[in-house]
Image: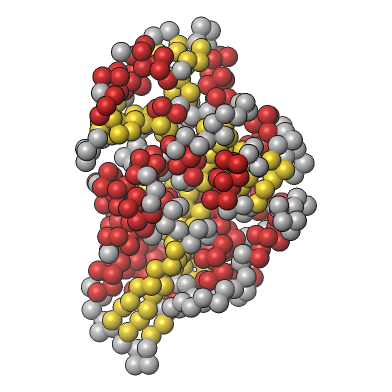
């Protein structure tokens, strides 16, 4: 088994995070006469694909308003607990300290397995953000790295968080490239912030992580993309899980949470710039990086409905976790419970949300001081606008010509194909396009701007 940098087996290190913690929590607890109820919500403020069940929801106060509207004679208090990853949320849930939590798809499966193992089952009750191709996870390298393809990772040190969706992307991507994830790389099991530091210091050659780390590091000029997770064409998402005993004991509270989540989702859709600013203020992340994922055309699509494609993806994910010895078999069908969100939204609205899909990828320019972005269906038109407004563009985003994954225009790999200018997230994807199109060639961002203008 691969070792962590401390010499502890990776699976054991990940499992250790799941041991019950001693921090106090709510357990939807009531005082002696039952007139005051405390609900504890675990979330990950900087994992911005969960904001509609965490950071944004909290800033809007929607959950508290829904609880006040219950009118059952009780006073409700919400205790928000912020974590860096999903593992401690699972630990707190199985210890009866957290009632509702949000996390990524792979941690959700560990949550399901751990709850079942301890006889304290949890249920997946809604989705926060998703990407049907897998674009929420990206493998990046240092800005000056000479690595240009996954095959270049052979013999290299790669940082990831074992048991996360980003680790799943790394394993799958390496296998497709003909590499053995257990033998051909040295995997460093690290939290995202530690991995980012390792990449900057040179102690890691690459970093595979989930939203918002790849985009954040790219925006800061501390990393460049090596592999776009959307090339896997496998859905990835984050969701909301609740303890089964809590859901049965306080269904009205869970329904209030899901109604509030839907309100936060609708707010994000109708006010994407303002939502990005709110999340940025709460987390310290650059608003431009938040918008890359959560914007109108962002990498994530937000909707609480539990789509069949996402459930099917969970079932495929189980084998990755089993190979890593992080779980045994997981009964995904028993874990998924959409009854509460269907009731919260109503049958008609739930069906309408299920029928809706991600928006068609287009480019966006965020002008300085603007509360709305400008949309461009053509990369050339976007570049022409940027070239003519260099001093007043806060950020520019373009969808990968192959996968549709949004990326910063000035961090994309650009290809000139005749008069067409095409952006790509990663060099390997760009080279694959060039190889299949005679006369196409990779150019710099400045050259692309010059051609467009």
Which image quarter holds the C terminus? Answer: top left
Q: Is residue 204 left or right of residue 305?
A: right
Vertical relation: 178 (above or below) 186 = above
Q: Is residue 356 above or below residue 442?
A: below
- Compare residues 448 and 269 and report the one nearer the observer: 448
Could you say which is closer to the camera, residue 348 or residue 288? 288
Q: Residue at x 32, y 47 (%)?
A: 276
* Residue under the image location 37 percent in, 79 percent down: 38
| Residue at the extreme front of the image, as rendered | 201
Residue occupying the far bottom of the picture: 33
Q: Residue at x 41, y 51 (%)?
A: 48
- The picture quadrant where one finds residue 332 is bottom right
Give the quarter of the image for residue 202: top right
Q: Residue 420 at x, y = what percent?
A: 40, 13
What residue is shown at x 54% (from left), y 63% (from top)? 335
Residue 347: image location, x then y, percent: 32, 58
Q: Position of residue 42 (x, y in %)?
A: 45, 66
Tally of marks: 0
Can you see residue 306? no
Relative to the observer, which residue lies in front, 450 or 149?
450
Left or right, 162 with respect to 276, comes to right
Percent position of residue 277, x then y: 29, 48
Check the image and tell me how it is coloured: secondary structure
- The answer to whether residue 176 is visible is yes
């Amino acid at each position: 088994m691969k070792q962590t940098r401390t010499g502890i087996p990776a699976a054991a290190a990940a499992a250790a995070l799941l041991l019950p913690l001693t921090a106090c929590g709510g357990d939807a607890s009531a005082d002696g006469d039952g007139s005051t109820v405390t609900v504890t919500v675990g979330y990950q403020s900087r994992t911005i694909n969960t904001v509609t069940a965490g950071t944004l929801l909290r800033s809007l106060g929607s959950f508290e308003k829904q609880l006040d509207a219950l009118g059952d004679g009780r006073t409700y208090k919400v205790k928000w607990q912020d974590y860096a990853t999903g593992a401690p949320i699972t630990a707190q849930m199985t210890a009866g300290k957290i009632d509702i939590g949000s996390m990524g798809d792979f941690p959700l499966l560990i949550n399901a397995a751990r709850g079942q193992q301890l006889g304290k089952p949890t249920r997946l009750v809604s989705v926060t953000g998703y990407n049907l191709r897998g674009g929420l996870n990206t493998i990046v390298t240092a800005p000056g790295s000479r690595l240009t393809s996954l095959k270049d990772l052979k013999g290299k040190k790669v940082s990831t968080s074992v048991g996360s969706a980003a680790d799943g992307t790394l394993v799958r991507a390496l296998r497709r490239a003909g590499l053995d994830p257990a033998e051909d790389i040295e995997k460093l099991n690290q939290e995202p912030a530690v991995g980012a530091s390792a990449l900057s210091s040179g102690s890691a050659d690459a970093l595979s992580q989930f939203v918002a780390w790849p985009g954040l590091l790219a925006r800061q000029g501390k990393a460049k993309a090596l592999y776009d997770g959307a090339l896997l064409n496998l859905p990835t998402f984050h969701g909301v899980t609740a303890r089964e005993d809590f859901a049965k004991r306080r269904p009205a509270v869970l329904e209030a949470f899901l109604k509030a989540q839907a309100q936060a989702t609708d707010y994000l859709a109708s006010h994407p710039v303002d939502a990005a600013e709110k999340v940025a203020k709460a987390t310290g992340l650059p608003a431009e990086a938040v918008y890359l994922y959560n914007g109108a055309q962002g990498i994530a699509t937000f909707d609480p409905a539990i789509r069949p494609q996402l459930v099917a993806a969970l079932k495929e994910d189980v084998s990755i976790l089993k190979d890593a010895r992080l779980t045994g078999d997981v009964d995904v069908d028993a874990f998924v419970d959409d009854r509460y969100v269907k009731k919260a939204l109503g049958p008609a609205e739930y069906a309408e949300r299920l029928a809706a899909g991600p928006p068609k990828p287009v480019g966006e320019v965020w002008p300085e001081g603007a509360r709305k972005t400008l949309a461009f269906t053509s990369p050339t038109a976007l570049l022409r606008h940027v070239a003519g407004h260099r001093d007043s563009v806060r950020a520019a985003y373009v969808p990968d010509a192959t996968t549709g994954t949004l990326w910063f225009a000035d961090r994309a790999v650009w290809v000139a194909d005749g008069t067409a200018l095409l952006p790509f997230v990663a060099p390997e994807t760009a080279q694959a396009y060039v190889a299949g199109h005679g006369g196409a060639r990779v150019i710099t961002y400045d050259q692309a701007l010059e051609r467009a203008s």
